[in-house]
Image (cartoon, grey):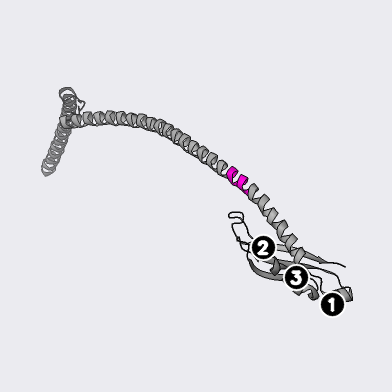
């Protein structure tokens, strides 16, 4: 009897455990299927009820106004640049015309000055030629006077000494003797040279013929 009771109890426990496991497995499948359906439904509902919309960015009015102002300013700047270019071109043309006019005036003034200078030079040349002719006359007179006043020294005659003496002397524009300097020659003739030059001056000279002092270089020849 005890063996039958134990086997019956054990068999009942097994059947109960199998039945319980079957119920649990069935419940898990049903829950998983329900969750899947729910997820599907939720996903479908999201897609159907809440479609993706494009976000439209609205530009505020202030930004639009600022853009318009910027465009207007750009147009004004372009207009100003064009005006500046035109004004610069006009200025360059005006400056060129003014420069040409100034250069013409300067050229005319220079021409007038050169004409005046040429006239003065011609006058001076005429006066110079006249003065030069008169100066040469005075040079000849001075040479003639010095040769007249020249005396051959007796000692040189006795010894038959000959020489050419180079002398430099200066006279004023009035014809007065200033100084005498003997540059070369035999010393025996120095006194006679100095006496001849001193005896030849002063000479009367016209005003304006010599402007400054005159320097003479003479070669006085002493020959027997």
Q: Which residues are magenta?
A: 121-128
- Which quadrant of the structure image shows residue 70? top left
First in sequence: mark 1 vs mark 2: 1
| Coordinates of residue 207 in the picture (x, y in percent) | 58, 55
- Which quadrant of the structure image shows residue 17? top left
How packed is label 1: few (under 14 Cα within 10 Å), some, or many (20 or more)?
few
| Coordinates of residue 71 in the picture (x, y in percent) | 25, 29
Query: Residue at left 73%, top 68%?
Result: 196
Query: Image check: 112 left or right of 195?
Result: left
- Quadrant (top left, top right, bottom left, bottom right) of the N terminus: top left
Q: Nearer the viewer, residue 180 or 25?
A: 180
The CA span between labels 1 and 2 is 31 Å
Please name the residue that numbered disc 2 is placed on.
215
Please name the residue that numbered disc 1 is placed on.
155
Please name the residue that numbered disc 3 is placed on.
193
> Could one spot residue 30 in this view of the protein?
no
């Amino acid at each position: 009897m005890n063996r039958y009771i134990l086997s019956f109890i054990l068999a009942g426990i097994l059947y109960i455990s199998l039945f319980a496991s079957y119920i649990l497995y069935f419940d898990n499948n049903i829950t998983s299927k329900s969750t899947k359906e729910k997820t599907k439904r939720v996903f479908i509902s999201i897609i159907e009820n809440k479609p993706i919309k494009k976000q439209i960015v609205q530009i505020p009015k202030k930004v639009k106004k600022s853009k318009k102002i910027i465009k207007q300013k750009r147009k004004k700047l372009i207009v100003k640049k064009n005006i500046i270019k035109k004004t610069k071109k006009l200025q360059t043309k005006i400056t060129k015309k003014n420069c040409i006019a100034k250069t013409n005036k300067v050229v005319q003034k220079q021409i007038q000055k050169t004409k005046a200078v040429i006239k003065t030079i011609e006058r001076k040349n005429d006066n110079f030629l006249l003065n030069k002719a008169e100066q040469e006359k005075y040079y000849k007179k001075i040479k003639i006077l010095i040769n007249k006043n020249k005396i051959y020294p007796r000692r040189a005659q006795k010894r038959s000494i000959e020489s050419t003496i180079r002398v430099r002397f200066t006279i004023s524009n009035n014809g007065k003797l200033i100084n005498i300097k003997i540059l070369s020659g035999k010393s025996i003739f120095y006194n006679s040279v100095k006496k001849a030059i001193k005896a030849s001056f002063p000479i009367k000279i016209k005003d304006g013929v010599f402007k400054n002092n005159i320097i003479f270089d003479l070669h006085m020849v002493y020959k027997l």
